[in-house]
Amino acid sequence: MSRPASLALYAAAMGAVSPLAPLVLKARVVRGKEDPARLAERSGRASHPRPQGRLIWLHGASVGEGLSLLPLIERLRGSAPDAALLVTSGTRTSAEMLGARLPPGAIHQYVPLDMPAAAGRFLSHWRPDLGVFVESELWPNLIAATKGSGARLALISARMSEASQRGWRRAPAAARAVLQAFDLILAKDEPARARFEALGGNVAGLWDAKLGAPPLSADEGELAALRAALAGRPVLLAASTHAGEEEIVLSAFARAADRSDALLIIAPRHPARGAEVMALAEAAGLAAARRGAGGDPGRARVYVADTLGELGLFFRLARVAFIGGSLVRGLGGHNPLEPARLSCATASGSYTEHWPVYDALRRENAVRTVTDIGELATLFSEALAERLGDLAGRGKDLAARLDADNAAVAPRLLALIAS
């Protein structure tokens, strides 16, 4: 990978500030952003021996990207059974989720900081034969070092926002060098293809890692226990919510809850916010319980689902699921296909720019869009009165078609990776 002056300057700057990295990481530990037991991994120091033979390294930044890799990991186990699999991510939540869901033998590590020394230590230990980055993780030093090590590189389900494109346009030589380090780029959609190609990337085709996934699983015992505890009460769900959204959801529920037995489940995107969300519910005058603290949903009006990996439970219980990250600017929405696959009526706010699939859902009237408390209250009221029509059915049908179309591309993806 040729190194333009802008990237050389960036590498020098990151090297110069690397002595401060331990202080920054320790400050993040205090804020709960880093795992103190595995802090060395962020400096490229492995906590697991490298397996013998070929090694495929897959990287997804956070929960959504990491989980989107799971179907590909299963396919790789079938098509390359002799290859060891290393999966990296950057957040504690993703590490916990992947730790519970990766198949036997796959190794999880935290991705190293984008500093030359950290990247060098990481690559010297793991020596990957292939690196697969998902979505939008473009770390120049790590990419350059991986390419320099002789490994092949793929960027799949690649996405880029307009703001990111504007940023890279200010350093066109750097953008071209980073993107041309990849032997394979598969864009998430046509707008992403256009942005990558405008910056000098060679896009081989389209593939969305978050399509073609199986329905979220649920523990049957837990599902039966929750149904028994709720004894037929109608359930409304707000999933993957962020700060600033729970207040809107709670106000809408208070307006809509004509039935005194209705239960609102709030599953915050970051489970560490569970106590905060519960305090908001109590401040709104609603009896609340936290799943993470062993609370009883049978005695609550609001149940805070502050646990990992259980959305499959709540989608199966709810009459409608509002998908968060979509009522406030800058978050871009979350996956609407997860509830749709489970025949759960789906709704969101209007800020869903990271998920172009919403356009298809809206065209087919397979999702409801709400923009304020009043519209969300109306949606909740209609769900409680069972007046949403076939919203759930349309969503499930469209999700099935999209998943099937995307799954047809998977063999080509594996062939391109194998090449």
Image (spheres, grey):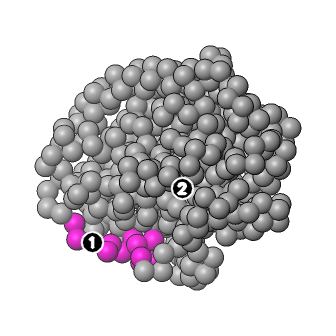
Q: Tag 1, which secondary structure?
A: loop
Residue holding disc 1? 48
What residue is drawn where x is 42% and y is 76%?
38
Residue 96 x, y percent position in the rendering:
43, 64
In terms of depth relative to the viewer, which is nearer, 161 or 97?
97
- In the current view of this chain or complex, which residue is farthest to the front? 231
> Residue 347 vs residue 57: left or right?
right
Numbered badge on residue 254? none
Neighbourhood count class around disc 1 (C-alpha, 10 Å): few under 14, some 14–19, many 20 upward: few
In terms of depth relative to the viewer, which is nearer, 361 or 141?
361
Is residue 211 shown above or below 93?
Answer: above
Q: Quadrant of residue 275?
A: bottom right
Is residue 381 shown above or below 33?
Answer: above
The mark lying in front, picked from 1 and 2, is 2
Assess whether residue 43 is covered by the magenta stretch: yes
| Quarter that holds the C terminus | top left
Tell me, yes or no, whether the two marked residues, 1 and 2, touch with CB atoms within 8 Å: no
> Residue 329 vs residue 69: left or right?
right
Residue 393 x, y percent position in the rendering:
54, 22
What residue is drawn where x is 22% and y is 66%?
50
Q: CA distance from mark 1 to mark 2?
A: 42 Å
Q: Which of the marked residues, 1 or 2, is nearer the chain's N terminus? A: 1
Q: Range of the magenta residues?
A: 38-50
In terms of depth relative to the viewer, which is nearer, 413 or 147?
413
Disc 2 marks which amino acid? Ala
Residue 199 x, y percent position in the rendering:
57, 35
Residue 370 x, y percent position in the rendering:
77, 34
> Residue 89 vs residue 81: left or right?
right
Residue holding disc 2? 229
